[in-house]
Amino acid sequence: MEDLRNIINPLCTFLFLGMFLHFASANTHYHDFVVQATPVKRLCKTHNTITVNGMYPGPTLEVNNGDTLVVKVINRARYNVTIHWHGVRQLRSAWADGPEFVTQCPIRPGQSYTYRFTIQGQEGTLWWHAHSSWLRATVYGALIIRPRLGESYPFPKPKRETPLLLGEWWDANPIDVVRQATRTGAAPNVSNAYTINGQPGDLYNCSKKDTIVVPVNSGETNLLRVINSALNQQLFFKIANHKLTVVGADASYVKPFTTSVLMLGPGQTTDVLITADQPPAKYYIAARAYASARGAPFDNTTTTAILEYETAPCPAKCTSTKPVMPSLPAFNDTATATAFSKSFRSPRKVEVPTEIDENLFITVGLGLNNCPRGASRRNCQGPNGTRFTASMNNISFVLPSNFSLLQAHQQGIPGVFTADFAANPPRKFDYTGNVSRSLWQPTRGTKVYRLKYGARVQIVLQGTSIFTAENHPIHLHGYDFYILAEGFGNFNPKRDTTKFNLIDPPLRNTASVPVGGWTVIRFVADNPGVWLMHCHLDVHITWGLAMAFFVENGVGELQTLEPPPVDLPLC
């Protein structure tokens, strides 16, 4: 017996020490975010822009896997605001997720709310942004998650790391832009510039002197964390004469692959290694639109930053010569966008759910509402006197206004939502063909889909050609999911199931559904709460291209949503 004790005691000590070191290495980071109007000058003109801590973009948060963030958001702006921590799993902490009227009521002007959450099992690049009206046009920043202390990247340590946030700038107040569109029923005005880390770059008026410069030394390998924080536009990204090795996306590592061009939908992040292996000079880092909707207006400008070699020998003239410009894909180059999105794999074999409990088929697309009876023509300035709308399975999502969905669920408040979102569209039709005009007008509703804890879920996201087909970046809050396959036309289970990658599919939080096509995702519903799924083109979520999942509690504390914080904002 004593021999057994002699074995067990050191073993217990070893296990306890391991657990202690594991938890002791995790830190809690405290931040104050003051949301306020700040004078910001771009394109020759100063606007009173909503920012965090007077910064545009906002502060970069840097943590390690396992760390906890405590961020007090103080609203000194004139608009309601919430902050969403895009891609953070928020395990049992749905109250900190942030979408307005989904997991919380907004933080009113003059009020505050403290977001508390722990990063669990995620490494790489995420970001944070406002999730209230169109405030995220300027209220956003990077969230960098490094490995746990003592652990390393699954690739050689880069010499430097640089976040590159791709944004969109209006020479106007973005809130006025969306309010005008909501009033008229027409599409909103497109942006006037794209930005890299808040700066439009050399090709725009009054912008050259503030162009972002990314320094490198010859021979070194650096990590670029590229984030598409644009409001309404997928973007191609390229660096002149340099190859990029993709090593991560949406805070998950991927099987490395080399490419000369990236395509990111709003919400998506891509981590790339770049080796400074070209003659010392200046090279443009450039981004411009991937515009897949035929005939729809878009901002066709190009934003630039400069990759600048610091090392000699650089000829004297190289300081004054113009940087080398990359040749970017054509605006409608779907083949390049598709080749890129199909290149992603997980680094090794993964446990994909194979038995499916919930099999959903969800159409995603635009629509047109007939002008309401008695409405003025000036309120129906969409095509042929209509109003633009959008839907999932023919339901155009309406946010509640008196309670958040999570509060209504938790407190049993009736009349806020119904749990009858359909698992299939109400009618089958040729989704990507010539769709009958009788199907162009969806029904408005606040509908959620109920999932049992632990349910294994498959969703076919099917794009439609109603009004126009378009690439839709679909983001699911509170979860990462495996992307099994994507394709064009209508999803055909007999033909297309054979294309599923069940070995090493990539893990993402935002999937680009191809223009006139489909994407299949799977996940296990292991996070209780109410979780929004929506198109990350904000113009589309404004029109109703969203729905929500209500995931029930499981068994015991570790499968149960935490109680609401005491300072949760009231509606």
Image (tube, grey):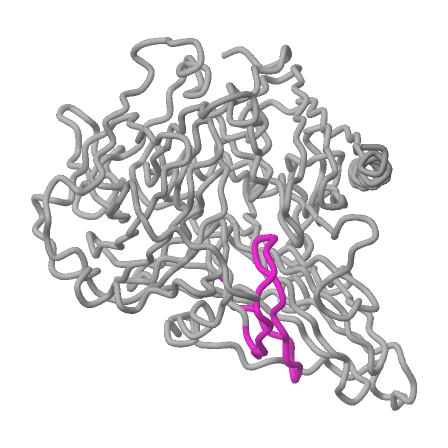
Q: Nearer the viewer, residue 185 or 24?
A: 24
Specify the farthest residue to the front.
Answer: 1
The residue positioned 36% from the left and 37% from the top of the image is 455
The percent coordinates of residue 267 (x first, y second) are: 52, 50
Query: Image height check: is 181 above or below 231?
Result: above
Q: Is residue 11 magenta?
A: no
Rendering quarter of residue 217: bottom right
Q: Nearer the viewer, residue 192 or 417?
A: 417
Query: Image height check: is 446 above or below 65?
Result: above
**Residue 451 falls left or right of residue 306:** left
**Residue 380 falls left or right of residue 265:** left
* Image: magenta residue range: 235-261
The residue positioned 37% from the left and 9% from the top of the image is 413
The percent coordinates of residue 233 (x first, y second) are: 46, 56
**Residue 25 falls left or right of residue 408:** right
The residue positioned 66% from the left and 71% from the top of the image is 285
The percent coordinates of residue 339 (x first, y second) are: 43, 75
Q: Nearer the viewer, residue 519 or 401?
A: 519
Look at the image and tell me whether residue 62 can be seen: yes
Rendering quarter of residue 29: top right
The percent coordinates of residue 269 (x first, y second) are: 58, 56
Quadrant occupied by the N terminus: top right
Look at the image and tell me whether residue 24 can be seen: no
Query: Image height check: is 64 above or below 564?
Result: below
Instruction: Name the magenta segment's main secondary structure.
Output: strand
